[in-house]
Amino acid sequence: MSGDGTGRAVLFDVDGTLVDTTYLHTVAWWEALRQAGRRVPMSVIHRTIGMGSDQLLARFLGEDRDPEEAAAVSAAHHTLYAEYWPRLAPLDKAAELLRACADRGWTVVLASSARGDELEAMRRAVGADEAVTAATSSDDVEASKPAPDLVRSALDQARATPDRAVFVGDTVWDVAACERAGVPCVGVLSGGITRRELEEAGAAEVYENPADLLAHLDASLLARHSRGG
């Protein structure tokens, strides 16, 4: 895709969509909160993964949270999660999916609620940067998912309008952000959120994982949308 505003863009979430990190984040947040004396079940934390850390901390520490406590929990999560960076594993066929999209002429942009350094670690794990036109992270926006800022930033990076883009993500927060930005969202189940939850949130299609989407790519919304269908 040319990236001149005349082509089509495919925007990808990364955590849980391209890289198998959802449960690593769950454990890291659970331990960071535990260190602060906050006992939150992992099952509850898992449902918040995909939000930006600002949104997650507001949920668990309260809107009137102590800024010092919030900063300490966030720093602890970052330190704990960073221990996994050398061992991060891409989901099956994630790199091939990005390359297949680029080969079809679609502009590929990554849109992650992760911090910039976390996103770089995941990009190294995927190993398909030659297929990626641009990337945006929580460092680049004022509000993270489910706010639409990241999706809009990715659209700007792709030089595309909402009607000429499709987003691929694994959480209801991705779907919510896309709805607010006017971009259709294709869901994947690789982050542990159920098909029913994604569909009820508004996902246009749902696939098992990147490999499943790749196998059906030319019949998917991504391809139909690129043809104006």
Image (tube, rainbow, N blue to C red):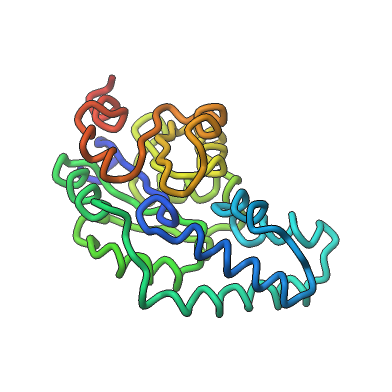
Q: Residue furthest left?
A: 103
Residue 50 left/right relative to 97: right
Looking at the image, which residue is at 76% across and 65% down? Answer: 39
Residue 47 left/right relative to 137: right
Which x, y percent locates residue 191?
Answer: 46, 49
Which x, y percent locates residue 148?
Answer: 55, 44
Residue 100 left/right relative to 66: left
Observer-nearest residue: 209 or 51?
209
Residue 60 left/right relative to 165: right
Image label count? 0
Which x, y percent locates residue 183?
Answer: 45, 34
Which x, y percent locates residue 143?
Answer: 61, 54
Corner quadrant of residue 73? bottom right
Looking at the image, which residue is at 40% across and 58% down? Answer: 20
Q: Quadrant of the N terminus?
A: top left
Looking at the image, which residue is at 40% across and 35% down? Answer: 186
In the rendered view, tell whether residue 179 sits above or below residue 136.
above
Q: Quadrant of the C terminus?
A: top left
Observer-nearest residue: 112 or 49?
49
Observer-nearest residue: 63 or 5?
63
Looking at the image, which residue is at 53% across and 61% down? Answer: 138
Q: Residue furthest top?
A: 229
